[in-house]
Image (cartoon, coloured by chain):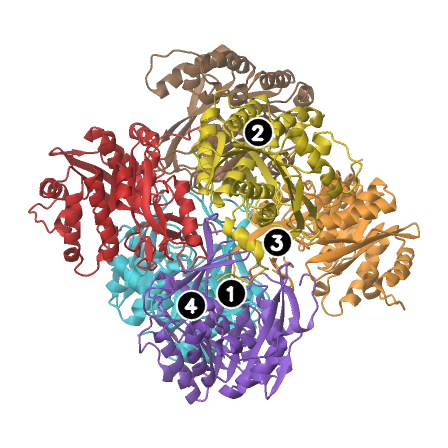
Chain colours: A purple, B orange, C cyan, D brown, E red, F yellow
Amino acid sequence: MPKNIAAFGEVMMRLQVPGFELLSQASTLNYSFSGTGVNVASALGRFGHNGYLVTRLPVNPLGDAAAAYLRKLGVASSLIIRGGSYLGMYFLENGFGVRPSRVTYSNRMDSSFNTSPEGTYDYEGIAMEIDAIHFCGITLSMNDGVRNHMKALARAVKQHGGTVIFDCNYRPSLWGEDGYTRAKPHYEEMLELADIVMMNEKDAIFTLGMETTKEQREDQLVELIPVVAKRYGIRTIAGTHRSIHSDNSHSLRGFIFKDQSFTFSSTLTFSVYDRIGAGDAYTSGIIHGEMEGFPAVKTVQFAATAGMLAHTVVGDTPMASAEEVLRAMTESIGDVER
Amino acid sequence: MPKNIAAFGEVMMRLQVPGFELLSQASTLNYSFSGTGVNVASALGRFGHNGYLVTRLPVNPLGDAAAAYLRKLGVASSLIIRGGSYLGMYFLENGFGVRPSRVTYSNRMDSSFNTSPEGTYDYEGIAMEIDAIHFCGITLSMNDGVRNHMKALARAVKQHGGTVIFDCNYRPSLWGEDGYTRAKPHYEEMLELADIVMMNEKDAIFTLGMETTKEQREDQLVELIPVVAKRYGIRTIAGTHRSIHSDNSHSLRGFIFKDQSFTFSSTLTFSVYDRIGAGDAYTSGIIHGEMEGFPAVKTVQFAATAGMLAHTVVGDTPMASAEEVLRAMTESIGDVER
Amino acid sequence: MPKNIAAFGEVMMRLQVPGFELLSQASTLNYSFSGTGVNVASALGRFGHNGYLVTRLPVNPLGDAAAAYLRKLGVASSLIIRGGSYLGMYFLENGFGVRPSRVTYSNRMDSSFNTSPEGTYDYEGIAMEIDAIHFCGITLSMNDGVRNHMKALARAVKQHGGTVIFDCNYRPSLWGEDGYTRAKPHYEEMLELADIVMMNEKDAIFTLGMETTKEQREDQLVELIPVVAKRYGIRTIAGTHRSIHSDNSHSLRGFIFKDQSFTFSSTLTFSVYDRIGAGDAYTSGIIHGEMEGFPAVKTVQFAATAGMLAHTVVGDTPMASAEEVLRAMTESIGDVER
Amino acid sequence: MPKNIAAFGEVMMRLQVPGFELLSQASTLNYSFSGTGVNVASALGRFGHNGYLVTRLPVNPLGDAAAAYLRKLGVASSLIIRGGSYLGMYFLENGFGVRPSRVTYSNRMDSSFNTSPEGTYDYEGIAMEIDAIHFCGITLSMNDGVRNHMKALARAVKQHGGTVIFDCNYRPSLWGEDGYTRAKPHYEEMLELADIVMMNEKDAIFTLGMETTKEQREDQLVELIPVVAKRYGIRTIAGTHRSIHSDNSHSLRGFIFKDQSFTFSSTLTFSVYDRIGAGDAYTSGIIHGEMEGFPAVKTVQFAATAGMLAHTVVGDTPMASAEEVLRAMTESIGDVER
Amino acid sequence: MPKNIAAFGEVMMRLQVPGFELLSQASTLNYSFSGTGVNVASALGRFGHNGYLVTRLPVNPLGDAAAAYLRKLGVASSLIIRGGSYLGMYFLENGFGVRPSRVTYSNRMDSSFNTSPEGTYDYEGIAMEIDAIHFCGITLSMNDGVRNHMKALARAVKQHGGTVIFDCNYRPSLWGEDGYTRAKPHYEEMLELADIVMMNEKDAIFTLGMETTKEQREDQLVELIPVVAKRYGIRTIAGTHRSIHSDNSHSLRGFIFKDQSFTFSSTLTFSVYDRIGAGDAYTSGIIHGEMEGFPAVKTVQFAATAGMLAHTVVGDTPMASAEEVLRAMTESIGDVER
Amino acid sequence: MPKNIAAFGEVMMRLQVPGFELLSQASTLNYSFSGTGVNVASALGRFGHNGYLVTRLPVNPLGDAAAAYLRKLGVASSLIIRGGSYLGMYFLENGFGVRPSRVTYSNRMDSSFNTSPEGTYDYEGIAMEIDAIHFCGITLSMNDGVRNHMKALARAVKQHGGTVIFDCNYRPSLWGEDGYTRAKPHYEEMLELADIVMMNEKDAIFTLGMETTKEQREDQLVELIPVVAKRYGIRTIAGTHRSIHSDNSHSLRGFIFKDQSFTFSSTLTFSVYDRIGAGDAYTSGIIHGEMEGFPAVKTVQFAATAGMLAHTVVGDTPMASAEEVLRAMTESIGDVER
């Protein structure tokens, strides 16, 4: 049964150099609008839910373009606020082989989302309308204003019985020096509010400062995640381990920890077209499985397959329907579909 | 010595989303005009023959564009009839890695070709002008009108001593439910008219309903093809076995059966740029070898190499000249040619 | 106050050659999705209403792309049905100066919209949800199935007290030989159901077969429109007179007839970028004015200005908000807005 | 009745900066293949004749591309010779308003055409196959080798009773210093061979060194052209007067002088999209009228209209069919054709 | 003789929707880098001087791209400082006919230029290297930091005997409420430092608060400019009057006031391709004439013609060389240059 | 410390079919300007030196475009001469997999560079300004005029104590029949002038006619290079061995021989985006290491890594800074940089 699921987060304008030129070589850009919340709301829409975005967009042609783009993606728009003057932006230069992709942010601190004043969002109203809401650690890194919105909204949803999902998603460059120390209390606050958390052992070690004597990441994961779940009272923790190969392919293995036990997906290996945003497809698969009451083994395999497919499409935002994910879970590589 | 070789078939407009976007993401299309007959006539032109197309194109700007495109490909145009209002179309979204390509047909049943009335084609006139003619199972699936043209033209060519080539090319989606049953009599009629047939063991098993106790496709092939050749009086049967690998490469091995014996090409493995239409390059290579009187071992290797090269060019239609195929038969992968 | 206004009509895929090449010169197309109903629903959305489209789209990637595009335009999607296999299409080659633009239709008779079976639309449900609905004479020309849907839906809306709008929009090429004779009864049926009708003296003379002794179109208009309004019991009749100049500019003068009197807009003269669909912007302006209770003089000037602006944007579909139309009603041509 | 009409001339690669950027601003080029002979042969093909090109193209991918492009244009290819290594090229930067377009030639002296050795063309064979042949003063400016081919071919056609057409087309930059003096004997030789000549009073004054006391170009024309016709024994002389206006429109008036009398077309005024090659459409119209035996008044109006339409299409080469020219001769500017 | 002339100003990234789509319709942008200082330095380079830019660019791929673009324009780079993180940006949607172009600024207050700390520029070093320097009122509107740099640099150049040029260029949207009041003292400070000033009567009336009893702008100009020149001790004041016509053409008339007398250019009327930055070409023409010691009549006509040509090129930045300006001063509209 | 390093060589216009179409399929080209000298001068600029180009460009829009492009690449322009009419050109069709890339040269013999008359370059002036200069065997193959410039310039630099670098770069197609015999004396002359030489065992065997009994190229290298160094008095000899794999990846291993001993880089294996010009990046790395006094092991690894990165960027010309090369020497393949 379709649920009403919201995501709270910033909409960013992605300005990508087409092909493999650098910004200093090219003269055109492809643009689209994305963000963790956009990706999650859109993916959940394709899985059959009503995927709302809670955000704030500027009152100008860039805000209009973003709003139109979100509608095209199938994101439900009724909780989007218009106000302020700026949109966060990032420029993307595609890497090739041994040359990595480069992302250059334009000033996002003054964006409509990151400068939304008190009173911008109707926490109670939103909480009454939705079954679940997704938050992301990127938002947590921005400033007190947006952190306050985030926590207040999480509390309101929790009070109304909704499910709170939190994706740790720690970005060192956004937290800067002493980032882990400054981030920890905010992360702990969100973890205590959350029912479903996206993370792996690295978040436990670095952000939460937990210690382990194990050396392999798989062993660290199995040791630390149950401790985190218990300490913060989290129902479900899920995440991935990724390996990057030299031939432009990645391997991905998902895990889910709930009811005191781990379930792992198979290890999927696949060629990568566009890596950005693919993690959000995995998250969306976990949310879908949890909201639909899938068994853990189906949830984690669905999520990993959704994540895999998201690496093969253009842009940050996942495009696969639930049917397409299910088909990719069972089929081998095929010829042209006609 | 150059021969006059015709192909009878529909011209379709191919509307392809550039790059790897979906139709719901993009806003531009690249278009070209192709079809099995187009591909065969064009390839034979590049091998030094006069490659005619027998078809019917609409009397409007789309028909003009198709005609201009066919001329550009080097297809001889004098047997093309103009009439009717519509052109068959298909939309192509490129897959990437584990995500398959998708083809969406627009209404082709009302195309000028598929609605050509009695009297459209001058069977006798065509038969007198040409040395050989190519037909395809796709055409056979359309409707009685076009099937009648096909069979009448095949008979006329046969009566005038021309060579009749038939490519089985069974497409399940075009025949629909109970397809094999409905297709079988039409296929048998064409097989009895044909001198050269493109098929493999699957056509024998599914379309002709033959039985085998073998499990490997190679064994099935060796068991069944000689029976087919004998039963329908076919001089030459040729075809391929294809394997699809996970890194966007395919392997191809061609066979030819004539004079009671099989000859196989080496197994060629290569990266694939555009898979559609590559089978027609193999067919054209077989026709070229047979019309030129190559020994079977040269014919099958030439055809397989032509098929391989056709996977590396843009569009459905093979672009390699006979010289380029011959060079690729002998050379290893090289650096830039300059 | 925003109203719920629907439009019933076909969605067509517009495939436009970029720039000024012919289909036989170019190799790329820009595509979008439009139609009279799309244009009206979208324009009304930009004027602040909820603009619904009642239509049927195919269950395939083309249908998905159309649905996404309509969402992007701001069209409310909840009354769109998915079913069938085909989308109507038209190819557009831009004219230049003395060389006219050319439109080539692909087969639209088999489109999902034009083959929608009985029971496709929930007439009562739609009628209860909306305040007004727009129909178009193009739909009337298609076939009995779609005409039946159209009339049944109009009757249901009328019965529920909603406003019925009918745009005569007679297209000779769609009605074929003896078109006026065959069209007349259907037109009369719609005129009797309609509260607001878009037409001018030509519809009265040719479609309704009325006679006039006047020679100037303005005189004919003033003579015939009141007769039409009275005969069919129409509250409001509106339309335009257009003149085409040799320098790529058009002149447009709108009229509205209600409460026994005519009101005319000023004559607007402007350069034309894309003429297709601009009439629908005028219609939308009339609907907006009538639904909002504007005085006739404001309604007709708003509509004419909306029509003018629609000639300056890319694509069939109007893009101007109510504020932009109002600003263009008062301002002179200005410098860059920055 | 369709005639076999050839044109002898160089094929040039046109490399055009898209839009209005300069070569030092842009990074892409659109390319096509044209030339006076190409334009004439293609236009005559669209008027229903068999339009042959007599030329020499290099044996490399540029030559292949040119040959394919000519086929697409409908030029009959059987008289095209392959040999040599280079293709003439020109780069085109579009002007805008008061800023003129700029053409930069790449080295054309070494082109396959301009270096074609003795024995390249089978004069007798060509002469026997065709009804008429077109030559151009641009070719005359190149070098002795190509001039010799030109004159020998003209003589052969004349001997076999074919019609020889010569377009004076004097280009000062190609003849250089003392150009008129050096050109005169070659022009006189061609004029004596020609049945139909394209020129106006400027050619008479500057190239042939004739004197006039008149000041208006119309008066000079009427004085000098009959003298030229008589002196060189020319059956038909035709040409145009062009005026360039500040709003990107041109005016064109054609004339034809035959049987001792002048006939003028109406003065056509029209917006210009691409001026290059439009003169060749006028020439083709004159040839068509003369070969079909039109009355002079129809010939000159057809030619002027064909010339006008050629200014409205992309590229050097005229695209209008005889039907389109005839329709444009009678109709006023219309709305979209649909 | 070439002079060393600098311009002090911000480099902005211009992100332009190609063609005539809105940001909410399109998906690609063309980008370039410009700004008043860039335009002036580049134009002076094309007039034969060494055109330096004094600015600060970020240390990231956007800064690298801007630096490369400036070098391509021929701007001398040795005075460009690298530091900070952001680049000012503006998005441009092209208008058409009655629909105006729209500019949307992204946050420019945090740009590397507008946040350059004390000590960024070596005022003395710059002053010793150059003969003249250009400043602009846009910079004056930014903040105290950049205003301080501007004034200190102007003083240093003046002390070293260099020529100070100031373009008033008041932008209401940048100064906001009470803008004129807040701007006036800064403008007066710059006017007292300046030798050459770009302004017209509107600057005198609004920014400087001067009064006039005249109603025509020409009369106001003649009354007020001499007063300004005297009050602030300005050697040369120059500017333009512009009229915008409905057919996408503008008229421009330049004036120069020096040695107590006015000189006017002819009124130039021309079609406009890209209006942004064209004023800077006029300024550059004035600077060139003054630095070269042209008579006033030549200076003002050269400047107006340079301004006219700048409206016909792609992008903000003038592209015409001195020779091209001089040619356009004397020639009528011509045919293709070849 | 930055050095002044020049390269002497031709600038060529590269006209590349975008994507994977052939010239006979496509209609657009991407263009840029490159050449061995361009690549070396630009790469050295990115490594922190002043990279000058000594060349001659035509006086026309193509020359202007080339000059602007070189400035954009960061090439120091003060030693570029303008004169002559033509630019060398090459057309590039990208191969795919087993289909090789094709290069078609347009006439380069008449280029401004290859026709530069005596007195074009101020050998003494250049020699006094620079620390080192790079020459290439391609230039040596052109004609006596350009060979004389090359040798005279090399001698002048040597006399002024500058470092002479010579890249053997033998191209069979440019030397034609008996090429090695004709080339040898010119190569020997340059080898005697050179301090640093780029070559491997093939140059020794084929161009210099040396003999070896070894069969492996590594053994041949180790046997022959020391003999070459001794015979011609060369301080440093460096070069690479390359292997081409079937999956579009190459392996590269660099060597440097100086002070009687060989040093080898590790063998780098990587996917290839654009192979052309990558050898020049290796050369530039060797020059950088030698001019900066790196130990041999750092020089050869830096050069090989620079060469590797140059295969991953668009266009002929290396784009990596010294920092980027150093980072790639130490890091493993990473995720997106953000």
**Marks 4 and 3, Cα distance to the nearest angstrom?**
51 Å
**Marks 1 and 4, Cα distance to the nearest angstrom?**
24 Å
Query: Where residue F18 sits in the image (x, y, percent)?
Result: 57, 46
Asked which secondary structure carries label 3, the reply is strand
Badge 4 is on which residue? A176
Q: Do the residues labelled 3 and 1 touch (CB within 8 Å)?
A: no
Query: Where residue F11 sits in the image (x, y, percent)?
Result: 52, 34
User: Chain for mark 4?
Assistant: A
Q: What residue lies at 64% left-to-right and 15% top-to-bottom?
A: D159
On screen, residue D199 above or below B48? above
Mark 2, mark 3: which one is toward the viewer? 2
**Marks 1 and 2, Cα distance to the nearest angstrom?**
46 Å
The residue at the far left in this view is E213
The amino acid marked with disc number 1 is Asp
Q: In this view, does F326 lie to the left or right of D253?
A: right
Q: Which mark is residue B14?
A: 3
**Marks 2 and 3, Cα distance to the nearest angstrom?**
39 Å
Whether callout 1 and callout 4 share a subunit is answered yes
